[in-house]
Amino acid sequence: MKKIIFILIFLFFAAQANDFINQRQDTMKKIKELVQSSNTLLKERKFNNQLANIYQEIAILLNEFPNLFPENSLISPSRAKRTILEDPLNFNQLAQEASQNAIMAKSAIIKKDLSLFFNSNQKLLDQCNSCHSRYRY
Ligand code: HEC
């Protein structure tokens, strides 16, 4: 009986960890899709509300992303490095800065300030890579 309870507890925590991993990977997949939709609109030079909303959504997802890293969730199939738990302040800051650049890109579209828009968008895309190279396998 003890063994069964132990196994059930183990399975419960494993399922919980997996839930966070799925949420993280789904968030990132969604962000990637949003960036792709943005590229399509940009090719057509459509600096419209739809484009502004894309950046709003990216900002919200990046802002919430650091909340998805409980202690026991940095296991396979996650590709997140343990450094995130050892260095949470830097990791959170990077996520916040990326989120703020997305907000900046959004308000630049609304103000029709294209140079500010391209500047913020480029910074945001650079931050995808810099976070991945530091915190992802
Ligand atoms: C603050 C850090 C950070 C930023 C900024 C960030 N990412 Fe990520 N990303 C991660 C981490 C960590 C993972 C691995 C998550 C895991 O496997 O648990 C990841 C995973 C991914 C994945 C793989 C998802 C999968 O299928 O498993 C994609 C695609 C991705 N990111 C795209 C992006 C794009 C595009 C941007 C910029 C707009 C971005 N990311 C910005 C940290 C970040």
Image (cartoon, rainbow, N blue to C red):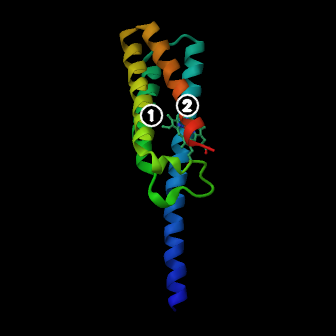
Residue 44 point in image, percent of width and height: 58, 12
- Per the image, label 1 sits on a secondary structure element best described as helix
Residue at 49% x, 71% y is: 12
Badge 2 local density, few (<14 within 10 Å), some, or many (20+)?
Answer: few
Badge 1 local density, few (<14 within 10 Å), some, or many (20+)?
Answer: some
Q: In the rendering, which numbered label is found on residue 130?
A: 2
Screen quadrant of the C terminus: top right
Disc 2 Cβ-to-ligand 1 distance below 8 Å: yes
Q: Quadrant of residue 63?
A: top left
- Per the image, label 2 sits on a secondary structure element best described as helix
Q: In the rendering, which numbered label is found on residue 94?
A: 1
C-beta proximity under 8 Å, tags 2 and 1: yes
Hey, what amino acid is under mark 2?
Ser
As drawn, 36 above or below 85 = above
Q: Residue furthest front?
A: 86
Q: Residue furthest bottom?
A: 1
Label count reads 2
Can I make out residue 10 in this image?
yes
Residue 114 point in image, percent of width and height: 45, 8
As drawn, 93 above or below 71 = above
Residue at 55% x, 18% y is: 41
Residue at 42% x, 24% y is: 101
Relative depth, front residue between 44 and 27: 27
Q: Quadrant of residue 90?
A: top left
